[in-house]
Amino acid sequence: MPSTQHLLLKQFITAATRPLARNRPRLSTMRLAAEFLSLGQLMPWNVFLTDVKLEGMAAEWVIPAGAPLDRVLLYLHGGGYVLGSLNTHRSLVGTLAQRCNLQALAINYRKAPEYPFPAALDDALLAYRWLLQQGYQAQNIVVAGDSAGGGLALALLLALREAGEPMPAAAVGLSPWTDLVLPAPLLRRVAHEESQVLEALEIHNWGAMYAHHLPLSHPLVSPVQAELHGLPPLLIQISDAEVLGEDVMRFAAKAQAAGVPITLQVFEGLVHWWHLFWRFVPEARQALDQVAAFTQAVWETQDRPTLPVAAVA
């Protein structure tokens, strides 16, 4: 059963989004609101920030004290491909980097509708290739993202596979958006849940803004539609109460059938983006600790010495 803190969060979201769902604010207004709300975020103690430009794209190193210098978390923020920024997700990236004991690189990829597909994917590829150019080994990189950023992380893996480029060690999707099609029956089913009304109404439009002239079922737009063989280990977290839940579970089943090492963690009754509220909601801290355990297991597998093969007489 969700915690009291989560119940209060859900009540707040319901109260805040009910009038927004009726009035359908402009995207510019929602962007400003997201930036304004980010002003109240606090960084974890002993996590340091350094601005960096990747061929003109704003990015940010998020470095916990004592983190090793040879491993890195590439983080892609959520926001439906149309909003969100380094500001909105800085606190989440900070605590995730600290819990995983990894320096993180967060990027401010281009957003739709001004920059539709493939702009965000191109920026993610740029960041990943930039890390390789800086001397980081692919097996020392973990890619992660939430919501649309989680879907973008999966699309990044697919693009790397198709290009024959080295894969990262693993990827993490926090409530990843894996299918932009969002069939009407699904939207109608969740519309009665007040805390999801705005989410259900808006993301259908945001997906079309991002895909632009492409069909929403294009595999690099909706990773659940892709062939999923040859991907590195994945950790996927989702709540069974989210609009995106069924599609994520379908993605996980398809990935497992394709032989991908995948860990699916399903949380009960939580709102979308519960990870962002890690200071207040214990389920968020629990989820992020499980991400840390997953990345630690990835490194332990790499660091385990390979036993010599015994000669056969």
Image (cartoon, rainbow, N blue to C red):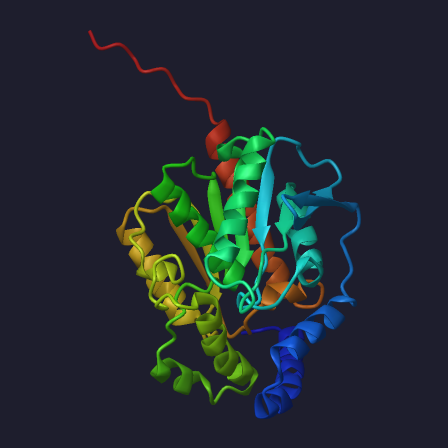
Q: In this view, does 106 lie to the left or right of 204?
A: right
Q: Which residue is drawn at 52% across and 85% down?
A: 197
- Residue 173 seen in render: no
Find residue 300 and report its horizontal and vertical position in percent: 51, 33
**In terms of depth relative to the viewer, which is nearer, 165 or 38?**
165
Q: In which quarter of the image is the C terminus?
A: top left
Find residue 297 and report its horizontal and vertical position in percent: 50, 40
Q: In this view, does 14 lie above or below 33?
A: below
Find residue 46 and report its horizontal and vertical position in percent: 79, 45
Q: Which residue lies furthest to the left in this view?
A: 313
- Residue 61 seen in render: yes
Q: Quadrant of residue 230?
A: top left
Q: Quadrant of the N terminus?
A: bottom right
Q: Which residue lies furthest to the top in this view?
A: 313
**In terms of depth relative to the viewer, which is nearer, 265 or 18?**
18
Q: Is residue 290 above or below residue 215?
A: above
Q: Is residue 31 above or below residue 190?
A: above
Q: Residue at x 34, y 62 (%)?
A: 218
Q: Which residue is drawn at 51% across and 75% down?
A: 269
